[in-house]
Image (tube, coloured by chain):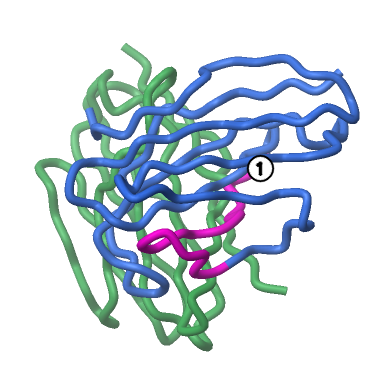
Chain colours: A blue, B green
């Protein structure tokens, strides 16, 4: 068990809707990263937050946004959902940031289905 | 476009046999290589973080090597057990902070 928890575990939305996914970090970790894993693909980096500031972003449009709170928990928000947003969304916490992120501690993921 | 390749995509191994698989990555701008084991219905779990060319790391029956000059890492499992059945992911981290995961190798251990 990593101590990283994500909610909800599963959810279904329709195109155009908005979704918020939540993640609580492992105790003592101040960095959180979000990944999207579409079917048959490896996890793709969305963004990373370090001490409440965005600290790096992958190739995702602005409708993917995030927040990190003072207790280092985090949210991923996706607006104007598209069918291709259907995926498993993984959150990972770590001690380091950027290229020095170090070992990632993952949650079990939130599976989003967009109809 | 940075691409991290893992091969094979899937393999079946008899219990007790040893096996290995590969992670290939662009060697330019390389910074670190991660291996994770991901069992069904669980979260990915870190196996190794490797940075130096020639690094070899071991955890029980699992070991990994790293060649940063030619851009590959091997993961070895000695004497496979049913609990080794999982997807093994590698991720390459680059000097510009990019992190790229491979698609994983799905390992099935046959009793």
Q: Which residue is mark 1?
A: A41
**Residue A75 place in picture, x, y as percent:** 52, 40
Along the line of sight, the residue nearer the viewer: A72 or A5? A72
In this view, A67 is above or below A37? below
- Residue A30 point in image, percent of width and height: 29, 56
Say few, some or many: other residues with alpha carbon within 10 Å of mark 1 (under 14 / 14 to 19 / 20 or more). few
The one of A42 and A8 positioned closer to us in this rendering: A8
Badge 1 sits on which subunit? A
Q: Is residue A19 magenta?
A: no
Q: Which residues are magenta?
A: A41-56
Q: Residue furthest top?
A: B111
Dominant secondary structure (helix, strand or loop) of the stretch shown in magenta: strand
Q: Give yes or no for residue A43 being in the magenta stretch.
A: yes
Residue sitting farthest toward the left: B60
The residue at 27%/21% (across/down) is: B15
Is residue A87 rendered to the left or right of residue B44? right
Q: Which of the 4 quarters of the picture holds residue A25?
A: top left
Image label count: 1
Q: Name, please, the residue furthest toward the front.
A: A70
Point out residue B5 in the picture as x, y percentages from the top left corner: 58, 59
> Left or right: A112 with respect to B98?
right
Q: Is A81 located above or below residue A50 in the figure?
A: above
- Give residue A27's position: percent from left, percent from top: 19, 42
């Amino acid at each position: 068990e990593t101590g990283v928890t994500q909610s909800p575990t599963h959810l279904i939305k329709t195109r155009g809707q908005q979704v918020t996914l939540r993640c609580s970090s492992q105790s003592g970790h101040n960095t959180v990263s979000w990944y999207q894993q579409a079917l048959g693909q490896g996890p793709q980096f969305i963004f990373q937050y370090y001490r409440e500031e965005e600290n790096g972003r992958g190739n995702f449009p602005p409708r993917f946004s995030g927040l990190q709170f003072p207790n280092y928990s985090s949210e991923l928000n996706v607006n104007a959902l598209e069918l291709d947003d259907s995926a498993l969304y993984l959150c990972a916490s770590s001690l380091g940031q950027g290229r020095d992120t170090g070992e990632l501690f993952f949650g079990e993921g939130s599976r989003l289905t967009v109809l | 476009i940075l691409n991290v390749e893992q091969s094979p995509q899937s393999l079946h191994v008899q219990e007790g046999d040893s096996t290995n698989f590969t992670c290939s990555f662009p060697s330019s701008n390389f910074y670190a290589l991660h291996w994770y084991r991901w069992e069904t219905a669980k979260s990915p779990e870190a196996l190794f973080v490797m940075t130096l060319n020639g690094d070899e790391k071991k955890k029980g029956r699992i070991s990994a090597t790293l060649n940063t000059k030619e851009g590959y890492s091997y993961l070895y499992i000695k004497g496979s057990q049913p609990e080794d059945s999982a997807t093994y992911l590698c991720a390459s981290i680059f000097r510009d902070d990019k992190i790229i995961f491979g698609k994983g190798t799905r390992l099935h251990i046959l009793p």
